[in-house]
Amino acid sequence: MAIIKKFRIKSFKKKKSIIEFENISLAYGNRLILDNISFKINEGQIFGMLGPNGVGKSTIFNLITGLINPKHGKIKINGEDVTNYPIYLRTKKFKVGYVPQYGGFFYDLTLLDNLKAISEIVVENKNLRQERIDFLLSKFELENVKNIKAKFLSGGQKKKLVIALSLLSEPRLLLLDECFAALDVLTIKMLQEIIVNLQQENKITICICDHQARDLLACVDVAMILSNCKIIAQDTPSNLVKDINAKNAYFGDNFRFN
């Protein structure tokens, strides 16, 4: 597959981090998931997370949103310690959007009614709700299916809807959990282009976790590999696939992404 991203942000002039994990550890019972990990996601970056099943990628999203709390360590958003902040406060104060792997919409409502329902929660100004909805319908080319119940939409249309729902609140940080899973090649390419355009046009910081390594690496600026509860490598895609630790733990010797 051709590289979607025509440029990669390899360094940041201000290097302002929007997300920062400091010595985070977490366990479920006796099972250790994250062992003293630290990393930063810089503002304006598209950041990727890769690793085997159960390594803690979705757990990191749950830690960012506040769905779970770490056993040790600090989580910072925009430099502020939010480790003990509830979900609603993180979402509202720091404008965090989340696209889950499954669901994320009302199955028996039309696409338009889904947007209307969520807009009533996240868009306080009533006069701006319809304007925001119309903008997102146009942006994601969903006007022709707006009156179809969500459960009858195609996989790509459902994914577009969930991303549109997450953008209603105009987030500064967007979390995408397994966004390429179970989609055909053309739909994946469409989503990659959407992700890159969100960075370029809307200046949104984006964090993606996925098992589809080639698809993820085609649209991120930086990615990290998680294995055995640790971060074993972090770099730009071209450097990451050459990293000996990343090869040994995840890619293997024959992996190519372009």
Image (cartoon, grey):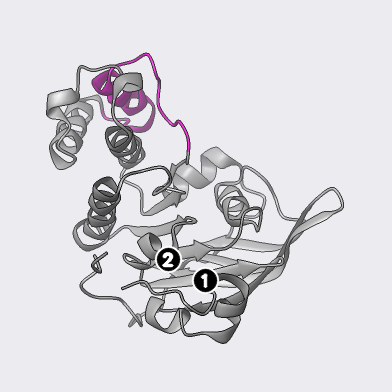
Q: Between residues 86 and 63, which one lies in front from this camera angle?
A: 63
Residue at point 24%, 65% (across, down): 4
Kind of residue indicated by mark 1: Met
Q: Report x, y in % for residue 140.
A: 19, 40
Q: Judge by depth and name the residue closer to the eye, 221 or 88.
A: 221
> Relative to 176, is 119 above or below?
above
Q: Residue furthest right?
A: 30
Kindly identify the residue that appears in the image at 57 percent across and 86 percent down: 244
- In the image, is residue 29 above or below residue 199? above
Q: CA distance from mark 1 to mark 2?
A: 8 Å
Please report the residue visible at 39 percent of the width from the left and 19 percent of the height from the top: 107
Which of the two labelled residues, at mark 1 and mark 2, occupies the earlier sequence position?
2
Instruction: Name the amino acid, label 2.
Output: Phe
Disc 1: which residue: 224
> Which quadrant is home to the N terminus?
bottom left
- Where residue 33 sits, quadrant-wise, is bottom right
Q: Secondary structure at mark 1?
A: strand
Queried whether the magenta region covers residue 254, the answer comes back as no
Determine whether, in the image, residue 166 is placed left or right of residue 140.
Answer: right
Extent of the magenta region: 102-125
Q: Mark 1 near mark 2, Cβ–Cβ under 8 Å? A: yes
Tag 2 residue: 47
